[in-house]
Image: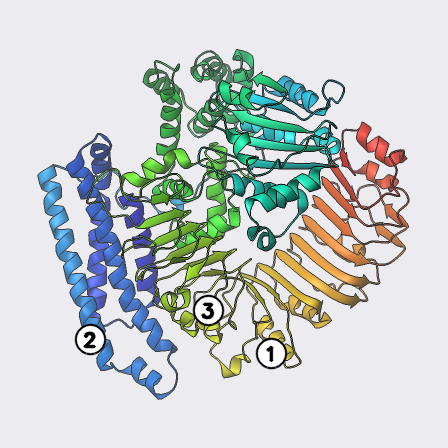
Amino acid sequence: MAESAIGSVLGNVSTLAVQETTFLCGVNLEVGFLKDELKRLKSYLKSADAKRRSGDELVATWVSQIRDAAYEAENAIEAADYMEKRNRLKKGFMGAISRYARLPSDLIALHTIGAEIQRVKRKISEIFDRANRLKINLDTSGVEKVHIEDEYPQDYGAMHQNFQDIDLVGLGDEYKEIVGKLVDKKENITLSVVSIVSMGGAGKTTLARKVYTSSSVKQHFDAASWVTVSQNFKGIDLLKDIMKQITGGTDESIAKMNEYEVGKEIHDFLLQKRYLVVLDDVWETDTWDQINKRVKAFPDATNGSRVLLTTRKEDVANHVQMPTYVHHLKKLDEEKSWELFSCKALPSYKRSVICDMDEFEKLGRKKLAKKCDGLPLALAILGGYLSKNLNEQICSDILLDWPSTKNGQMMRDILARSYKDLPNHYLRACFLYLAAFPEDYIISVSDLIELWIAENFVPHTPKHILEETARNYVTELAQRSLVQVVDRSRAHGWIEEARQDGFLDGIDKTAGQAGASSSSDNLMSYRFSFQNLSDQILPATPNVRSLLGFKLSSVSLPKLRFLRVLCIENSTLKDFSSVIGGCIHLRLLRLRYCGSVTLPSSIGKLLYLQTIDLRRTILMSVVPKSLWEIPTLRHVYLLSWNNFSPPPPARSLRLQPKELKSFVLDFDPVGTDFRFHDMMIFLGQLNQLTTFSLLMPPDIPREVLNIFANMPHLVEISLGRFDVLDKLPAEFPQGVRRLVLHADVIKQDPMPILEEFPRLVVLELGGYKGQTMCCSSQGFPRLQELELLDFPIEEWRMEDGAMPKLFHLSLWRCKKMSKLPVGLLHLQSLGQLKLTFMPQISEDDITLKELRRKGCEVKK
């Protein structure tokens, strides 16, 4: 995506040019020239893109040259900017010389940078000449008329749709039938299979997920697990995933087990339990045999255990050698098709602004919805597209473009139209980026946002921080049904689109996929996604900007001079510490579930680093003090056990912690020399935080609570654990939305303080030791999730009007609560109640029975 490349480069260079005023005059002039030339090139791309998509190989090569020139220009400009940043951070006599004069090494570097800029200028000049020969026209229709505000998606305030309920439209009867087959012990008590069969896009996974999460299924089975199989699976990986879900085992312990050991562990655990195993998206007939080839992992205790399987193939559905019920998922009829289509295309908040609702309904019901041939996915995506384009001309165009709908091309056409209709190249790049993840990978929204920002896919907009704009991008994609929030990534049909112009290349050794670009032998890729590689140097090009790796065993990083994103999971990296210090352009460093990692002191050279995320990765070195000198650092997530030492007070070190937005630390301060006073000074500087989490066994000193008076922007707080708290302080920021706090003992009722927080949505609290607890009327006005752990209360008084929006309530080990409070019946929104280790609450409890009668899902 050349337009995305130029857009991100222009955004970055503009920021650099504004911040840095000490460039040598000549370099400054060259930077301005390159910016103007890139803007001019961008105006040619609309005409060029149409020719490229029509199959013109010469134009495709020309477009890729624009992208290459944009990235090379950014590299050169950022090299000069980096030199200035580095010199300003130098200390002492040499620092003074660097700031007010020019060292010989600086002059040499500037000469090299100038020569590189001249080379890029010549390359851009040749690109303009080639545009004339290729007859690519300058598009002046909107050049420099679009303000940055227009890049900010609109229409977010009004909708809070339950996407899962909408997507289940038309499947209600089949949902009841499948649930009935799973929980009916009278018909078949032996281990048996229920298979859901249909073509792609018919809603197999949506239906199975709704069944899997239903209250009756959860209550019926003692253990349950869900794994997505797909075309390229390893039996041992599926078994390990199942084991983690049913036993709660740690990744570290399970990773060391072989296939026989995992299968035997699962077998022994399930032997006395009624269980459900869901195998989603099965392609091969021998999948069940492959999972059980080393040991029979799933015993038949003749107690009604079940396997739920979804597949596109009839022979797969019938192949498992045990009693099988095959359910053929029907397409939606005309009425149900319209119901789903209208939910997406005409949400309630938009109907009031449509002048001729009857005409739209007539056109949508009889023609547009019918085009989708009863496929829920097609209906949802087309409806999402039309919700952004509610006019008759668009509808007429769709009817003309798609004369036939009885083949797979129809789905591709709908997806392509919805993708092309995304309002700007930023969103298109954000969507294509999903193709970097493995199939059916669960993507955290916050992780994805940090990646998008590091890639410069999120523009700076007036009155909005980057994270807010990015979250609205997620909402935009969800509204269009291009992604599902709280679901799994299904963007992999777009891997070829991402490869076409070198946006992304992927290599999966298990699948036998090569990483060569499909459009041209000379096309250079700048982003790579690797899966299942081992014992080699990752085959990335020297100019690579982003490298994502999943399940890489004992691999080495090449020297990546221009790397901006490094995201590695479930892997072992060789020579990491010797390579990372040279990646001076790096924005995001994320190592999850990786082998032992050492952070070198050269980490402080990464002056553009925004995010460092080492969660679930064992850090073998002390966190270098140089990390805190990085001026751009925004998000820090560390699991360092006894290897975290707070930096000295700010007066003795040029710290730059005030820009931090997220700080998550899980460590154990071993020894008597831990400088807790320095720790408090350090934390006290983090006054811009929005997310703060501190896990510090065995106990967090109570003084940590004093820092919140200086953190007005916090929205997420997680603290575990304290020893004894007389009461909770009133100094928590009033804007907090999620609060997790655990203590051995909280003496005073915490509710009178917490219920005053106007924006609190999620509360997890452990350790209150009082006998009574009271929630007053009007308290907790926005609370939706409440989890209470180790509350030995005997009486819980809840006044009418408290917690008006509470949906999920979980009680753990509240052992002195002999009956549920009657006040729960006043909670009109309560939909889920979970009781864990509370045998004293019987099935005959009056409140429990009444909650179930009212439709609340209760799980004990």
> Which residue is denoted by mark 1 in the rendering?
678
Image location (x, y in percent) of residue 751: 79, 54
> Which residue is denoted by mark 3 in the rendering?
599
Res. 464 visible in picture: no
Res. 846 visible in picture: yes
Contact check, label 3 and label 1, Cβ < 8 Å = no
Upstream in sequence: badge 3 or badge 2 = 2
How crowded is the residue under tag 1: few (<14 C-alpha within 10 Å), some, or many (20+)? some
Residue 459 placement, left or right of 58:
right
> Which residue is denoted by mark 2 in the rendering?
108
Image location (x, y in percent) of residue 264: 64, 42
Q: Residue furthest front?
A: 294
Name the secondary structure under disc 2. helix
- Give the foreground label among 3 and 2: 3
Give the alpha-carbon distance from disc 3 to disc 1, as whole Å.
21 Å
Residue 425 placement, left or right of 200:
left
Image location (x, y in percent) of residue 562: 30, 60
Under mark 2, the amino acid is: Ile
Under mark 3, the amino acid is: Leu
Considering the image in quadrants, where does the C terminus appear? top right
Residue 692 placement, left or right of 659:
right
How crowded is the residue under tag 3: few (<14 C-alpha within 10 Å), some, or many (20+)? some
Residue 729 placement, left or right of 473:
right
Contact check, label 1 and label 2, Cβ < 8 Å = no
Name the secondary structure under disc 1. helix
Q: Is residue 356 above or below residue 158?
A: above
The quarter of the picture where residue 707 lies is: bottom right
The answer to which of 41 and 482 lies nearer the viewer is 482
